[in-house]
Image: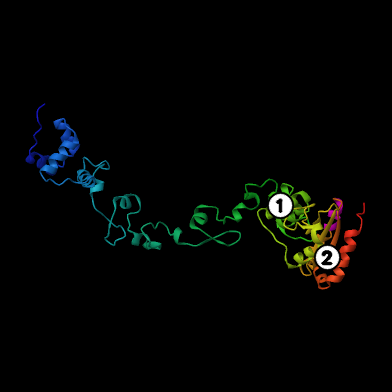
Amino acid sequence: MKKLNISKEFLIKEYITNHKPVNKIAQEFGYGETTIFRYLNNYNIKIRKVLEYTKVRLSNPKNNPFFIDGRTLKKYFCKGGCGKEVSVNTYLYHGGCCRDCGALSGEDSPHFVDGHSTKEYYCKECGAKISCTSGHYGGGLCNSCSQKGERSNKYIDGRSSKTYYCIELDCHNEICYDNWREGKQRCPSCAGKELWKNEEFREKNIKASLKGLQLKPNKPETILGKLLGKDYKFVGDGKVILGGFCPDFININGQKKIVEMYGDYWHNLPKRIETDKRRIPTYKKYGYRTLIVWEHELKNLTKLKSKLINFNYAKNKK
């Protein structure tokens, strides 16, 4: 095989002067690019970067893929009169103004046509300020008014334009037409209260809220637990839920009995009083007798012990 011999003058002419890439030089001699790079290094010819070759190549209009009719080679200046040079795209397709002149308003703006963009527009019904697009080209209404009455995409026979209220007697909250149409005739607040009356729903949510929590008895519950002894176990952490209620202490010695610890403040609140009225009847459904111990009773432990003894030795009523 004939040994390849490339002169330094040839590489300078083709690679430096004519800006020919290495791969094309290698194709002419039928060798790989590595061989050409080795000759360049041997002759101490600086190897140019790909970016430098691309800039030189695109400078020739025939090699530029964006070349059409010479428009990209021209220089363009702002139409606003400031004399700043702008890009060909800005000049030909985006108004021909620089950023400063493009921000001009009124008759000074190069986009000025008939003055409609400089006016202020207001909704025909409510008087709220609206955009130029809605006022000049649209219906002259704000987003809210454009969806009311017959203009609403849900309009059938006027029902959607009426005002509906919660069916609860003590509630005067307004509800949307969709809730009324679907039979949900209560506001979110009253609907939640009605749903919470369901024992299964309440029990499910209580278990979910207490899952993973390690609740410990508070100070009054700790004192009461010591007085009850080993016959009772603290289940106020959600271990036992009966009809959506979580008792504090339950008998584990064969008797169906429950002891509840009521705080003097919380259990005297009106909402808690209404809830506690359903607590004992609910436990009774499951066959449990319930004893209520108030926080202030802990001040007289002798009397409280007597109360607990009488409750523990009393037989369950069927």
Residue that extends furthest to the bottom in the rendered view of this protein:
299
Q: Main secondary structure of the magenta part?
A: helix
Q: Which residue is mark 1?
A: 207
- Residue occupying image coordinates x 55% and y 53%: 139
Q: Magenta segment, which residues?
A: 278-285
Question: Vertically, is 4 above or below 68?
Answer: above
Indicate the position of residue 239 as horizontal and vertical percent values. 74, 53
Q: Nearer the viewer, residue 309 or 168?
A: 309
Q: Quadrant of the N terminus?
A: top left
Q: Which residue is mark 2?
A: 293
The answer to whether the residues at label 1 and label 2 have Cβ atoms under 8 Å apart is: no
Q: CA distance from mark 1 to mark 2?
A: 25 Å
Provide residue 281's location: percent of width, then percent of height: 86, 55
Quick one: label 1, few (<14), some, or many (20+) residues within 10 Å? some
> Under tag 1, what secondary structure?
helix
Tally the marks: 2
- x and y percent of residue 18 in the render? 13, 41
Inspect the image, locate mark 1, and give the three-letter code of the amino acid beneath it. Answer: Lys
First reached walking from the N terminus: tag 1 or tag 2: 1
Q: Residues within 10 Å of mark 2 (few under 14, many from 20)?
A: some
For badge 2, the amino acid type reads: Val
> Which residue sits at x=26%, y=47%?
72
Residue 228 appears left or right of 180: right
How far across and down, in percent of the image, does residue 53 sit? 20, 44
Residue 278 appears in view: no
Is residue 283 among the parts visible in the rendering? yes
Q: Is 100 part of what is drawn in magenta?
A: no
- Tell me the quarter of the picture where residue 126 sits: bottom right
Q: Is residue 16 left or right of residue 132?
A: left
